[in-house]
Amino acid sequence: MHNRHIFDILSHSQKVEYLHANATFLAKRSTHNYNIALYYLHNYYVESFYFKRDHQCDYMVTFLSTLWLSPYLDIIQLDLIV
């Protein structure tokens, strides 16, 4: 499933299953109520929002623009060989 719009119309359980089987985990961050996991899937990104109280995935957001990656820039560490 290389198309983001097809992923968006899957049921919640199908999204969770497909994401865990096929995506690459990139980073995680927290807000007051959510732990948010960032994944790369084919040619788009997916944020998965886990409610802190019950650790269940409440919803997912897909996007293409790297502008949406700004909340992760302080978190991501790259090991560069010079």
Image: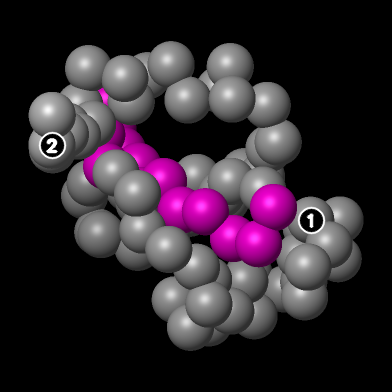
Q: CA distance from mark 1 to mark 2?
A: 34 Å
10 Å crowding of disc 1: few (<14), some (14-19), many (20+): some
The tag on residue 64 is none
Q: Earlier in the sequence, mark 1 or mark 2?
A: 1
Q: In the image, residue 58 lies at what x, y percent?
A: 48, 54
Comparing 79 with 12, the one in front is 79
Image position of 3 with respect to 79: above or below:
below
Q: Secondary structure at mark 2?
A: loop
The part of the chain drawn in magenta is 28-43
Instruction: Look at the image and tell me whether residue 59 can be seen.
Output: no
Which residue is farthest front?
A: 82
Quarter of image, res 36: top left
Q: In the image, residue 43 lies at what x, y percent?
A: 69, 52
Quarter of image, res 79: top left
Q: Give the residue type at disc 1.
A: Arg
Instruction: Look at the image and tell me whether residue 23 can be seen.
Output: yes
Q: Point out the image quarter for the N terminus.
A: bottom right
Does the magenta stretch mainly form a helix, a strand or a loop? strand
From the image, tell me which residue sits under label 2. 81
Q: Secondary structure at mark 1?
A: helix
From the image, tell me which residue sits under label 1. 4
Image position of 11 with respect to 46: above or below:
below
Residue occupying image coordinates x 86% and y 56%? 5
Relative to 65, 66 lies left or right: left
